Image (cartoon, grey):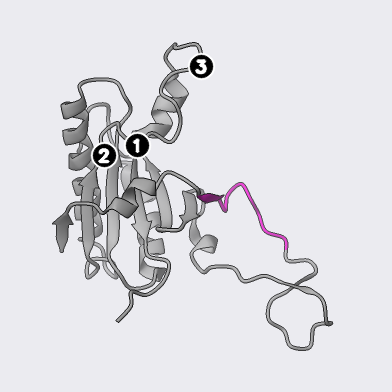
Amino acid sequence: MLTAGCSKGEEAAGTGGQSLDAATAPMSTAGVETGNPSAPSGSMRADVSALAGDTSGLNVRVTDMGTIIDLAADALFDFDKSTLTSVAEAELAKAAELIRRAPPGAIQVIGHTDSKGDDAYNQKLSEARAKTVAEWFGRQVGVRQREFQVSGKGETAPIVPNETAGGTDNPVGRAKNRRVEVVLPTTAPPG
């Protein structure tokens, strides 16, 4: 089911997160207790989320509002388009695997653009891209039964500056801001 809108909590999606990138941050388990009751007293204990092991190169961060997968729009869509490219499915399939393992609850799909172009146009494009991603998830086995809340924020929530400190264009920053966030619940909803 697709529902439009976003909550006030979504406004904080780009702040205060911890980045998890399984492709660039391998975890060593040497000397770490994983719940073994026979381990020596005073040893460290680490619990690893089942979600973290399956990111395989996805940009994933954990915030107070949930686990956020940042999907680069440039990897999913051609310039100024909201239809998926032929290579988009590989990235979306990785995200779908994380959705399958996520706790119950609605999945938020939030589109973002950079600051180039008209505000109203960017808003419409961000919404269309989020809807396209949610519709793709809605056709996947083990994912389609989830509720998807779809919204777009246009250029209003950049994660890095679109311009350099000197006021010149920042193409690397703009590329990072063009994204679709998939927000997974971190715990089961109350009830």
Please tell me which residue is depicted at 74% across the width and 88% down the height of the picture. Answer: 37
Instruction: Measure the C-alpha gap from mark 2 to mark 3.
Output: 24 Å
Callouts 1 and 2 close, C-beta under 8 Å: yes
Tell me if residue 156 comes above or below residue 145 in the rendering.
above
Q: Give the amino acid type for the residue marked by disc 2 in the picture.
A: Lys
Q: Which of marks 2 and 3 is nearer the N terminus?
A: 2
Mark 2 surroundings within 10 Å by alpha-carbon count, few (fewer than 14), some (14 through 19), many (20 or more): many
- Seen from the viewer's position, the closer of residues 85 and 179 is 179
Asked if the residue at tag 3 contacts the one at tag 1, i.e. Cβ–Cβ closer than 8 Å, the answer is no
Q: Position of residue 106 (x, y in %)?
A: 27, 65
Q: Which mark is residue 157?
A: 1
| Helix, strand or loop status at disc 1 | loop
Residue found at the far bottom of this picture:
38
**Cα separation between marks 1 and 3:** 18 Å
Number of other residues with Cα within 10 Å of mark 1, as a class: few under 14, some 14 to 19, many 20 or more: some
**What residue is pinned by disc 3?**
165
Give the residue type at disc 1: Ala
Q: Is residue 117 left or right of residue 31?
A: left
Please provide percent x and percent y for residue 160: 46, 31
- In the picture of the structure, the residue carrying the numbered disc 2 is 153
Relative image position of residue 59 (x, y in whole percent): 48, 47
For label 3, the SS is loop
